[in-house]
Image (spheres, rainbow, N blue to C red):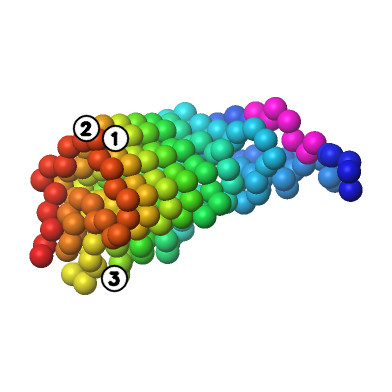
């Protein structure tokens, strides 16, 4: 109808390390809506969602993907995501409608096929972050990132990412199949069969003031 209901407004939550939290409230007060937004499953009409890790680490222990995003205006910052495992992004899967920014974070030792750490279909910006020692399982591409959407890498480092199967093919750090902008970033010691640092497959690629050093293509 014409009535507009505000389910959530100016919500802020803080969690201590290893804390177990229960959210209680009357039916219809917004509990499920809040959890779905935090989990990146629901979109909100206005505002921003900021997930601040405050230097903590989420270790998936090789059991599951850590974060799947379908929402918009979402920022993840100051966190380490490690040992994520899955198909299409071991640490993060950003859906076609997702708008996600990653700031001052570390993504390490994640494994997936494709996109060892990140699989992106939407709009993704990675700033002042490090993606290192991520791998692709099986026959696939993008040791750290597999990009099918719009991706910007700014002031970040991608190192020691690789495709760990002899039949895996392209992009030790990034396999790009859409739009990729790299600014003031460093790619070092990434390994793939084709495109040790970056494999650009009919995508749009812009690289500005960046360093690509000691990356290796096995072909």
Which mark, residue 209?
2
Q: Which is more toward the observer, 73 or 159? A: 73
Q: Find disc 1 in the rendering and name its residue.
A: 183
Does the stretch in magenta take in 8?
yes
Report whether residue 137 is seen: yes
Q: Position of residue 191 (x, y in %)?
A: 17, 55
Quadrant of image for the C terminus: bottom left
Q: Report whether 8 appears left or right of 106.
A: right
- Spatial CA distance of label 2 from label 1 is 6 Å
The quarter of the displayed image where residue 26 is located: top right
| Cα–Cα gap, marks 3 and 1 | 29 Å
State yes or no: discs 2 and 1 in contact (Cβ < 8 Å): yes
Is 44 or 161 nearer to us in this picture?
44
Foreground: disc 3 or disc 2: 2
Q: Sort mark 2 into few (<14), some (14-19) or many (20+) by Cα contacts within 10 Å.
A: few
Q: Who's the residue at 36% across and 64% down the image? A: 113
Q: Position of residue 52 (x, y in %)?
A: 51, 31
Among the 4 quarters of the image, the one containing residue 166: bottom left
Determine the secondary structure under disc 1: strand
Q: Measured along the vertical axis of the image, is residue 215 above or below residue 101?
A: below
Dot 1 surroundings within 10 Å: few (below 14), some, or many (20 or more)? Answer: some
Q: Determine which residue is flagged by label 3.
A: 139
Q: Which residues are magenta?
A: 6-12
Name the secondary structure under disc 2: loop
> Which residue is depicted at the point 68% across and 42% down?
44
Q: Which mark is residue 216?
A: none
């Amino acid at each position: 109808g014409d009535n507009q209901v505000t389910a959530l407004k100016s919500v802020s939550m803080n969690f201590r390390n290893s804390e177990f939290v229960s959210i209680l409230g009357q039916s219809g007060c917004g509990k499920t809506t809040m959890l779905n937004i935090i989990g990146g499953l629901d979109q909100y009409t206005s505002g921003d969602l900021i997930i601040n890790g405050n230097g903590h680490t989420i270790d998936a222990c090789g059991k599951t993907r850590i974060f799947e995003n379908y929402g918009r205006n979402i920022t993840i910052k100051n966190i380490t995501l490690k040992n994520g495992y899955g198909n299409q992004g071991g640490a993060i899967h950003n859906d076609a409608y997702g708008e996600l920014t990653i700031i001052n974070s570390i993504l390490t030792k994640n494994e997936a096929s494709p996109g060892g750490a990140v699989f992106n279909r939407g709009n993704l910006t990675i700033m002042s972050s490090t993606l290192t020692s991520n791998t692709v399982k099986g026959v696939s591409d993008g040791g750290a990132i597999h990009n099918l959407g719009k991706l910007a890498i700014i002031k970040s480092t991608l190192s020691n990412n690789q495709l760990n199967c002899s039949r895996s093919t392209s992009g030790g750090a990034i396999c790009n199949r859409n739009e990729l902008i790299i600014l003031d970033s460093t790619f070092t010691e990434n390994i793939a069969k084709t495109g040790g640092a970056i494999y650009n497959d009919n995508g749009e690629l812009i690289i500005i003031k960046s360093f690509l050093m000691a990356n290796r293509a096995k072909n």
